Structure formats: structure tokens, C-alpha cells
Image (tube, rainbow, N blue to C red):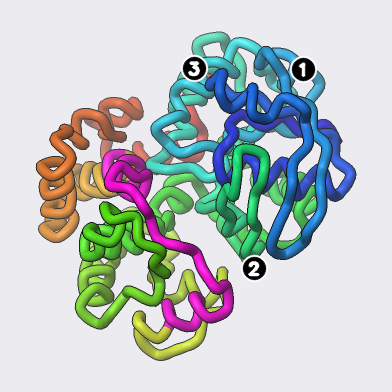
Amino acid sequence: MKIGILGAGNVALANAAWLASKGHDIHLWTALDGERQALADGTLSIEGLINTKAEITIASDVSSVIADADLVMIAAPAFAHDTLMSAASPYLTNDHVVMVHPVTGLSSLLLSRMTAKRNVAPLIIDASTSLFTARKAGPATVRILKIKDVIDIAAIPARRGAEAMMRMSAIYGDRFRLEPNALAVSLNNHNPVYHVPPLLCNLSRAERQESWMIWECITPGVAKLVKLADDERLLVVRHYGTTEISVADYFRQAHGAEGDDLPAIFASVAKKLKGPIGPQAFDHRFITEDVPYALVFFDALAQAAGIEMPITRNLIELTSALYERDFVAEGHTLERLGLSGLSSNEIIDKTMNGFAA
């Protein structure tokens, strides 16, 4: 299959390398000139689960990546989604399949709004998290620690869910669970509840660029903050009637984690994966992505439903102060997503059908 990938970070390179090693024709485009130059010869090195090299095509324009692609993948942090989707949207047709890998805060609705303006409605597939636990080990090297056992996906429009499952399984195998709508997938993005509290509680390690194992550093006190944030997320999940998966259950399902409490669960994952290393910078996507595009989104849905999220709100306000940024203004509010003023049922309907007429 021809698979077009937009992005050049951890998720993009992990997918590009893995899929190319399986014989797929990978075409990759990034909006950043420096990344394109670093990847110019098209050779990716894979470490970790497998140790090999893979050949891909580095495109100079986005149109060639999308043309005749069996799958187009948006594989970048949420703060790059608007840029990549804006670049891709003019070239998408009704016949295209676009995977947002992973989606954060219903970012797929941004793409649905863009294409709807042209009366185009590609099949959009939301992934709740990256299928790969991976890190870039160099400009053209990626270390894959694990392929998750199962992740959630949803289709926009939801009526094409069976087709989405068929297409994903044909490429990656039986690793997906179909959710009834895109809202369920975005609400079961657990990254913010297990990224933001551990980084805040270990911020000095990141600033000193220490080599620290993030899951090993989730002590009982840190785990309590993770659980408090997750409990608030679950209140929103229950209100909107989506699938309820706690952060503990997510780690058991995706990573085969063991243990009766969160510190034990995270420690078991750290032992299995021998990683990942925690952030080694103050300015890191665990904050700059997960707060504005996920926690702000959770809180916006909660406010629309009359639900209080004091822990989540405090995390947003604390990080906004520390980073001297207005993460609410930057983030995925209901207004930005085109959901402002809608009832809970209308929000659910929009995440099932998108913006196409």
C-alpha cells in the first residue's frame, strides 16, 4: 500500500519505519525544512523491538504524498495538527482515508470542518493514542520500545466504523477496538492524566536534563494526583455516555501492566519497557500539547455539562502560570472546534457525523 505520513516526530518516524519494514510504500512530508533535510536520503534506522533499516520517500510537497495514497496519516503532536491539516485539506477527496494518529481533543473535527467547506468528506479515523511507544534516537533513527496490544479508534462518520476497522487491521493487524464515536476516543486519551502530574512533580529533573525513568518516579503521592485527575476525566466520560476506561485499566490493556495500585502498575511497565526516559527539557509536549489540547478540552466539555473539575482546572492554571502562556486561549475550546452552544446530545451527534452536509 502507498501510505502518506505528515510529520517527522516520534510517532511519524515509528510508523514510517515499521510500515516500510513490512513492505509498504511510505511517502513522508514535514512542514519543517530542517527535518526534511535530515531525512533527505530516505533511510531510517530502527532500534529496539527490531534492528534494521527501512527506505522511505521524502517528499518536497504535500500533494505528492496524498495523491493515490491508500492511507494518509497525520502523525504529529496536536499543536501541529492545524498546520498539517490545512496543508493536506486542499488535496483530499471523498475517496481518501485519513488517520489522525493520535487524535487529541477532537482535533479531527478541525479537518472535518476544512474539507466540508469544499463539500468533501474523507473517512477520518481517530486513534486514541500512538500504537507505538517510541522515541527518536537521532534525526533519522527511531527506537521502538513496544507496539501496544490494543488502542481505541473511531470513524467520522461513525457509520463507516466497520470499514475503518477493516482498513486498520489490514495494515497493523488485530490491535484495535472500535468506539461508537470520535468523542469516546478523545475522552479516553489518557496521556494528559499520566503526563502532566508526573512532569510537574519532577520538573527539576527535566530542567537539569537528568536521565530519569518517568514511570519509576510515579510514587504514591504522584500517583494520587494522577488518579484525582483521572477521576475527574471519568466524570465527563460518564456524562457523555462514552466507554469508561480508567488510566489503570488502560495500562493493563495496552501494556499488559500488573499490580493492584498505580505505583505498582507504572513500575511494572517501566520494568517491561526499560523506559521511556522522562522529559529532559522544561518546554516539552507533555505540557505544551497535553494541557491546551487535552486538559482544556476535558474542562470545556465539563463546563458545558455543569461538571466541576477543580484538579484539572488547577493543573491548567498552574502550568499556564509556570509557562507564561494562556493555555485556554491556545487550546481546544468548544468554540474552536465548532461545538460552542451545542447540547450534550448535539456534541455527540457532531462527533459521529462531522461537518459534511
Residue 234 position in % (x across, y down): 30, 64
Is residue 345 in view from this perspective?
Answer: no
In the rendered structure, the answer to whether residue 260 lies left or right of residue 85 reads: left
Q: Nearer the viewer, residue 66 or 187?
A: 66
Residue at left 50%, top 86%? 258
The residue pinned by badge 3 equals: 114
The residue pinned by badge 2 equals: 149
Amino acid under label 3?
A: Met
Which residue of the protein is positioned furthest toward the right in this rendering? 23
Q: Which of 146 and 130 is in front in this view?
A: 146
- Comes first in the chain, label 3 or label 2: 3
What segment is highlighted magenta in the picture?
Answer: 265-292
The residue pinned by badge 1 equals: 67
Amino acid under label 1?
A: Ala
Residue at left 49%, top 30%? 354
In the rendered structure, the answer to whether residue 201 lies left or right of residue 234 reads: left
Residue density around tag 1, few if under 14, some if 14–19, many if 20 or more, within 10 Å: some
Residue density around tag 2, few if under 14, some if 14–19, many if 20 or more, within 10 Å: some
Which secondary structure lies at badge 3?
helix
- Comes first in the chain, label 3 or label 1: 1
**Mark 2 and mark 1: Cα distance apart in space:** 31 Å
Residue 114 position in % (x across, y down): 49, 17
Which secondary structure lies at badge 1?
loop
Amino acid under label 2?
A: Asp
Magenta stretch encompasses residue 273 = yes
